[in-house]
Image (spheres, grey):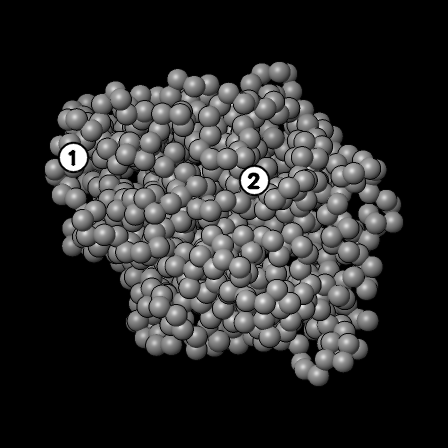
Amino acid sequence: MRKSLIAVAIGAALTVAACSDKDATQQVNETAQTEQAQNSAFNQSNPFYAESTLPYNAPDFTQIKFEHYMPAFEAGMDEHAKEIEAIASNPEAPTFENTIVAMERSGALLSRVASVFYNVAGSNGNDDTRALQGELAPKMAAHSDNISLNPELFARVKAVYDNREGLDGEALRLVEDTYKGFVRAGAQLNEEAKGKIREINSEVSSLTTEFQRNLMALAKENMIVVDDKAQLAGLSDSEIQQLADAATSAGHDGKYAISITNTTRQPILSSLENRELRQRVWEASAYRGTGNTETDNRPLVKRLAQLRAEKAQLLGYDSWGDYVLENSMAGSPEAAQEMLRDLVPAVVSNVEAEKAEIQAMIDREGGDFDVQPWDWAYYAEKVRAEKYALDSEEVKKYFEFNRVVEDGVFFAMNELFGITFEQRDDIPTYGDNIRVYEVKDIDGETLGLFYGDWFTRDGKRGGAWMSSFVSQSNLLDKKPVILNNQNIKLAAEGPTFLSFDEVSTMFHEMGHGLHGMFSDVMYPSLAGTSVSRDYVEFPSTFQEDWMLNEKVLNNFAKHYETGEQMPKELLDKVLAAKNFNMGYDTLEYIASALLDFEYHTLSPEAAASIEDVAAFEAAALERNGVAIDAVPPRYKSTFFAHVFAGGYSAGYYAYMWSEILAADAFKYMQEQGGLTLENGQKFRDTILSKGNSKDPMQQYIDFRGQEPTGEALLERRGLTTPKID
Ligand SMILES: [Zn+2]
């Protein structure tokens, strides 16, 4: 049971899903399909049949067609099941090699097809991939259960675990990790309880896939079509053109279509002058999935909370949160909730100060209303412009895409780690405008491949993320093939400019990328980013801060026409404005993180008794002291994809936990001389190369010399003292 493989199966739910329910005719007879897979459909003509012969086993997208996926999945699951059976029924006494290592070697075909399919489905999906995802979700869940609930296999794993005293280092970690994985999956339960776990896993898998699929449907249902261009005052000509193009592709020629993005807050609200339209956009976003249009996510929210609570109870935990956080750095929901709640007073007082400034701006402009959530971003932008005289459009002129990539991100990584990125135009990709680089180490040795898929496209899910086609393993002699995704809008013509946040996100994703790229472990289960959720965002958040390092900034932030460096005056303003609105940003996040825990610390009975999702949400926010009307949660229940469509249930807090580590580590590195190869090497040796081969707190202490404190986080966010002005 390669954990990376199981993670891929779970990750499936995070990627996009179908817009309509799967057609009954697509539900094929499983037996017939398996036979077909073994006979005609799966043979050497299928590009997944053997390892890719391209450099680094990069997927050969000149050969891969949609019809290759399903036969390869069927054959891959079949092959993996046989390999596992052979391990479980091995007549020899169980050893680390013939059991644990053999499992690490298993599932190669399934891993090949899954890593390609789920990446393509997430980055360049369509109705076909979405339908296939829906079809695969329960099969992959069942496949995973067949392994983790196999009693003969578990008996062998337990035997190795019970006799582990001769093992050390990575091997010991792998045995403990594998054993714990089985126990947490229910291997020690009786057959009846195991059967229930299977049922729950299968239903959760289907529901999370449906939730994600519904989000796509809801985006369509809630698209705002504007007839009159005058209503779009405040947008630039190119932005208006993009809305016109979007309307045309949606069949509303001559009109303007505003799409809803995946957070409550909508980026367009910072520039739309028309208050009524702002309200329309905000309401379309905030109320999506609440039964006001065809697609309703409320039943899924309730059912998922209940199923998770039931599963936790079966496994002997008080709540789903207790079960999930057992495997984290934080250790328990209480510890994570306490960390979040400790921040609330400082954050709320900052929010109140921000709100007062925004209300003053509204009053000065003669607006006769109290600030509403759809007003916040628009007036915040005005306050920002006045207070810092900072025009984000002017700043963008210094964030031209190519300079950001090459002279910013790549430059910083070269300064810190000595690595270089060489573009490889000969490696095929799965879509337009994807760049492939070969990454070379400081000594010229090759490290792996890096795909930069930075631009938005139809069929790409929202947000930004890192994943891999091939993960590093010395056992399997694999170098990493890493992928970064973002949703930057490619300019219709001329240079593409990035916002401050988009630049920061690119550094962030590179941080995950290097966690995968520098991985230097034996076993694939322990490679790269396969660490606990509250640790995985640490290396990525840590890299964000290099964007504002003076040397880095001076190297990439140059005017796209004149090539001049960003003037000192503007740079000072950017730095001063960095933490503007940080009270809002932090509170909307904390509100969602606490909401996540409210759903996932319930008993099965309490979860089953949720009647009204909106009322539950409101009460939860109130109870945690984060119910502020003008600052709604970043994600509300009915579109909280992290927790109801993906693997972040009882885990959304993890970003803040990781940020504590990131802020503390970055501050420490600054004290040690900042951007130097020596510092980079230490970070690489202690953190980035280790994957999950060592306890995360120990990794951190190896780097830092002590455990982290929250102080640097508050400094990083400018929230140490409530603002009074
Ligand atoms: Zn991240």
Q: Crowdedness of circle 2 by 10 Å Cα count: few (<14), some, many (20+)?
A: many
Query: Which residue is pictured at 17% across the width and 26% down the height?
Result: 40
Mark 1, ligand 1, within 8 Å: the answer is no
Where is residue 311, by image quadrant?
A: bottom left
Query: In the rendered image, which quarter contains the N terminus?
Result: top left
Query: In the rendered image, which quarter contains the C terminus?
Result: bottom right
Q: Amino acid at mark 2?
A: Trp
State the separation of the CA atoms marked 2 and 1. 38 Å
- Which element type, helix, strand or loop, lies under badge 2? strand
Expressed as whole percent of the image width and height from the top left, the position of residue 439 reads 58, 24
Work out whether mark 2 precedes mark 1 in sequence or the reverse, and give the earlier one. Answer: 1
Instruction: Please tell me whether mark 2 or mark 1 is closer to you in this view.
Output: 2
**Towards the viewer: 394 or 646:** 394
* Marking on residue 366: none
Q: Crowdedness of circle 1 by 10 Å Cα count: few (<14), some, many (20+)?
A: some
Expressed as whole percent of the image width and height from the top left, the position of residue 370 reads 67, 81
Looking at the image, can residue 136 be seen?
yes
**Is the residue under label 1 in contact with that under label 2 (CB below 8 Å)?**
no
- Which element type, helix, strand or loop, lies under badge 1? helix
Query: Which residue is pictured at 76% across the width and 43% down the height?
Result: 398
Q: Which residue is mark 1?
A: 34
Mark 2, ligand 1, within 8 Å: the answer is no
507 versus 220 height, above or below: above
Q: Which residue is mark 2?
A: 454
Looking at the image, can residue 180 be seen?
no
Expressed as whole percent of the image width and height from the top left, the position of residue 422 reads 61, 22
| Residue that sits furthest to the front in the current view | 254
Query: Which residue is pictured at 74% across the width and 76% down the height?
Result: 362
Q: Amino acid at mark 1?
A: Thr
Query: Which residue is pictured at 73% across the width and 60% down the height?
Result: 580
